[in-house]
Amino acid sequence: MRRWQAAILGGGVVVLTGCATSGPVSASGRRIPPAVWTAAETRVAQENPPPELRLFYLDLYAEGRENEALHQMRLGLAALRTGHKEIAKRALDAAIRDVESLTAGEAAAQRAAGKFVREQTKWFKGEAYERAALFFYRGLLYLADEDFGNAAACFKRAQLQDITGDDAPGFAGDWFSAEWALAFAALKQGFPQDAEAAVNRAAQFSTRQDEVPWPRAQDNVLVVVEVGRGPQKYRAGRYGEQLRFQEVRPAVRTVEVRHGERLLATSAAAENLYVQATTRGTRQVDHILQGKAAFKEGAGTAAVALGVGAVVAAHHRGREADIATGVLGGLAVISAIVSEAATPEADVRGWDALPHSIYLVGVELPAGPVELEVRGRGAGGESAASLKLPIIVQPNDPIQVVMVRL
Amino acid sequence: MTAGKGCVKGTTMNAYLIRWTGLVVTMAVGSGCASPSPKPGVQYVDPATAGTLGGTGLESQDIVAAANKAAASIVTLPQIAQATTPPIVLITPVVNRSAAPVDTELYTTKLRGILMSYAPDKVRFLARDVGFETSKREEQLRSQGEVRAGRPRSAHTYDYILTAEVRGISAASNAAQSDYFLVAFKLVDYDDLLVWESQYEVKKEGRYHRIYR
């Protein structure tokens, strides 16, 4: 084997194996250096967060800037569900800062648009449904704090984040749950006309699931019921260049809130996140990834053609044939290397803790200790899940937000 | 073609191939593997200057600018500037009716601070948010003899209410997004008469990198 041939072969081996990973790997597929991991562990130990949130902090501190918003989202939702409201607020606000910033991570975004850099190396800002969910959950926290103005602002912002491609114009800003919660915040703020406008907008949404009772100004408890597992991202297409979502459909289709024998409310889902994820239409990044895939395929085809040419040339005698064999073989290897190095794979990092469906039930309860029952029913009306929910309703408290996971 | 020339040509060709191969491999390896994270660092930034994060929401410089404009205008009002006794103003929390979360307490605090610095001897402020409940509780303890009796409490009332409301129009599409904010300040006297109103507006437009759209 000649030197240059060995160099090309060696180069190919480097390309094919150079990124091999061992040890902890980030959500974007990067190897986390042991020193970084150790530093993250030390920081978590020093800060001593609630035990149920420690792993979220560890990922946040270990995985670097490109996954910060992702881990803030995950931490924020976990904290909200476990009753750590202040942590949830800080985490979701941090994620919002990244998502709202049009320039944060611009250099990484520019690199990720290139043919040899994976899309998932860009700073995570989430898909439209994840960004909308971010503002929706932050709005719930403002509601709980009785900051109805900022709650309403967040629910409006959730709709603004729900953008679509030109091929799906009817699905932009169609979060029913955001309009529902906006109506609630507006009623609590003393703006019934804003609430009515929200109801009227929501009535036009084609993504509306079924009958969802609207909130009333006198409702003092908001039961937020999260059901099932949210849309799971996966790659499709020959080179994994297409982003797709898998639905894990939960058994629960309606939710009842009961107080003893009394049925307080029955509601369909206010939001189906799988529907939101899959009505986005074509994204501009889809065109970028298609371009990368076409480049990869073209380079691969060229490698095969050049390889065939090299083989044909090798069957001829003479110096020119030797040179042609070498050149064609070399170009074939280079094309193969280039094809291999092209990275059209879609970014499948995701806020995977989101639920499949969100139910919103507003109820009016007397002050004092109350045990509610939240019951989920299947498509045939059968009981699919049930949870007892002891709460204490404070006198003159305009609203208490209760998170339930069925 | 002589053997010698052919050999030279072949060597040159090989050298080119090796160079190009090296370049391609370097690019592929360099771009495909981890790149170092940005170095952490902190720098002081004037809060009145535009931030570098580039969002279309309300930012600190907008708060500073709006509060400055309002304060400069208020202190020139005859009701304030020519009052024989400095009037007492109650600043109410900002009402946010826009589509962007706003730190309403920051607005209130900033506005009060700027007014204080503009005209410390021309206007006084009620700070019910600070000590009202504590003082009421203390008064109760005094009357019950739980603590020593002091001078009787005589809480002030206000001459004017200063309100602020944020409204906005926001839009977003697959291509770009924009936010227009109108911050309206009002000074209302105890008899509900609107004494003064000032508005501050800002509009921002921007777009994500296409890889996020």
Image (spheres, rainbow, N blue to C red):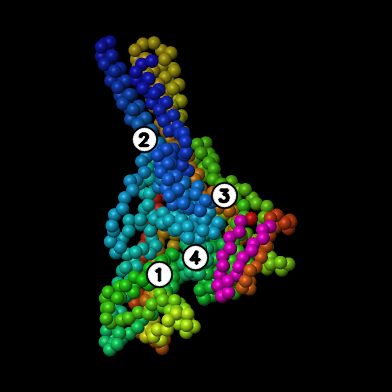
Q: Is residue B40 magenta?
A: no
CA–CA distance in space, label 2 to label 1 = 48 Å
The amino acid type of the residue labelled 3 equals: Pro
Residue A218: percent from the left, percent from the top?
A: 59, 74
Chief secondary structure of the magenta span? strand
Q: Name which residue lies at 38% across and 15% down.
A: A1
- Of tags 1 and 3, which is closer to the observer? 1
Pointer 1 residue = B105
Q: Secondary structure at mark 4?
A: helix
- Of tags 2 and 4, which is closer to the observer? 4
Q: Are marks 4 and 1 in contact (CB under 8 Å)?
A: no
Residue A142's tag is: 4
Sequence-first disc among 2 and 1:
2
Pointer 3 residue = A231
Discs 4 and 1 lie in a common subunit: no
Q: From the viewer's perspective, is residue A40 above or below residue A335?
A: below
The amino acid type of the residue labelled 2 equals: Gly
CA–CA distance in space, label 2 to label 3 = 33 Å
Residue B30's tag is: 2
Residue B124: percent from the left, percent from the top?
A: 32, 81
Q: Name which residue lies at 36% across and 35% down.
A: B30
For the magenta stretch, what is the residue range?
A386-405
